[in-house]
Amino acid sequence: MANIELSRLEESVLNMVKENHLTSFEILKKVEDVSMILSLYNILDQLNNKGAIKSYMKQDLKYHYAA
């Protein structure tokens, strides 16, 4: 991944999905600074647009992982 500028929250979320493929709810429980699911969705969209994460569906759940 090329060097891209990330906010503190984006880095925190990215570090979570570097360890394991996680659902949005699992990420929400692990990242302390994000209290609302809508905020997390915005962060995930930003990371996706920057090419830092990718997602896939498995058993009707969407998983996110570091690209």
Image (tube, rainbow, N blue to C red):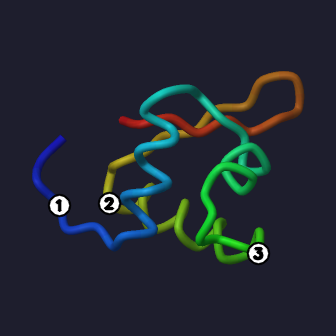
Which residue is found at the position 36% from the left and 35% from the top?
Answer: 67
Q: Give the mark, 3 or 1, whose residue is nearer the N terminus.
A: 1
Spot the residue most to the front. Answer: 32
Residue 37, quarter of the rendered image: bottom right
| Residue tagged 2 | 50
Measuring from the top left, give residue 38's x and y in whole percent: 74, 75
Q: Amino acid at mark 1?
A: Ile
Q: Is residue 23 left or right of residue 53?
A: right
Q: Amino acid at mark 3?
A: Met
Spot the residue most to the right. Answer: 60
Measuring from the top left, give residue 58's x and y in whole percent: 78, 24
Which residue is found at the position 58% from the left and 39% from the top?
Answer: 64
| Residue tagged 1 | 4
Check disc 2: other Cα within 10 Å, few if <14, some if 14-19, many if 20+: some
Measuring from the top left, give residue 63's x and y in whole percent: 67, 35
Quadrant for the N terminus in the image: top left
Q: Secondary structure at mark 2?
A: loop
Q: Is residue 7 left or right of residue 54?
A: left
Q: Give the mark, 2 or 1, whose residue is nearer the N terminus.
A: 1
